[in-house]
Each structure stands twice: as C-alpha cells, then as structure tokens.
Amino acid sequence: MIVVAIIFILLGVLIRYCKWYFLIAGYNTMSDEEKQKYDIEGIAKLFRNVMFGMASMIILGYFIAKFFKSPNILECSFWISIIIGVPYLLIKSNSKRYRKN
C-alpha cells in the first residue's frame, strides 16, 4: 500500500509541476479552443492536493496499522481514501470554479 501512496504523490507532482496534463482524463482529447475555457493550472493544483491527501491517508493508515498490529486498518485507510478522494476530485474538477468566462 505504501507503493500506492508513492504513486499518488508522484502523479500529483507530475501533473502539477511537470505539466503532465495528459494524465487528466478528457483534457488531452479537447480541442485547443476547449482547452482555453478551463483553468488547467487550477485543476492541476487540485489534482496535486487530492493526490497528496489520499497518499497521506494511506501512509497514516500504514503507521496506525503497524502500531496496533492490525492490517485491516491499512486496508480501510486505503479504501476510505479512494472512496472520499476520487468523487471529491471528480466533482471539484468539473465544477464551474475551473471554467474561464
């Protein structure tokens, strides 16, 4: 599970700082006119923050699971981060906040 957390961190960094916007579903297939309508920097920042948050939950779950010697805690922290993080990311990134006028 720690590997998954590292992948989330890596994806967040690549999208935000290396401008790997092709990892954002649908953005790569938009026309240049459509891309101009979105604040991609804001969306990339959102992706970074959510990926870091999901990774943090998994890492925290890992240490709590080690402390209590219960692998179920790690699994729960993973699924909670996915169940909360993915819908939040989808809802926020598709909101009007990131559309330019």
Image: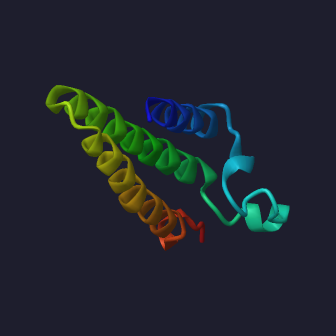
Q: Is residue 1 left or right of residue 59?
A: right
Say which quadrant the N terminus sits in. Answer: top left
- The image quadrant of residue 25 is bottom right
Quadrant housing residue 85 = bottom left
Seen in the picture, residue 85 relative to 41 is either above or below; the reply is: below
> Which colour style is shown?
rainbow
Relative side of 79 to 93, left or right = left
Instruction: Residue at 17% x, 27% y: name it.
Output: 67
Along the viewing direction, whichever of 9 and 77 lies nearer the viewer: 77
Q: Which residue is drawn at 76% across and 68% down?
A: 34
> On screen, 99 above or below 76?
below
Q: Residue 24, position in %: x, y? A: 66, 54
Q: In which quarter of the image is the C terminus?
A: bottom right
Does 5 sit above or below residue 42? above
The residue closer to the viewer here, 79 or 11, is 79
Q: How many marks?
A: 0
User: Which x, y percent locates residue 70?
Assistant: 22, 37
Q: Position of residue 23 (x, y in %)?
A: 69, 48
Side (left or right) of 79 relative to 35: left
**Which quadrant holds residue 59?**
top left
Which residue occupies 56% across, 32% down?
A: 13
Residue at horizontal 29 percent and vertical 38 percent from the top: 71
Return the residue nearer the eye: 1 or 38. 1
What x and y, as percent, mark residue 58? 35, 39
Q: In this view, does 61 lie above or below 95?
A: above
Q: Nearer the viewer, residue 55 or 101?
A: 55
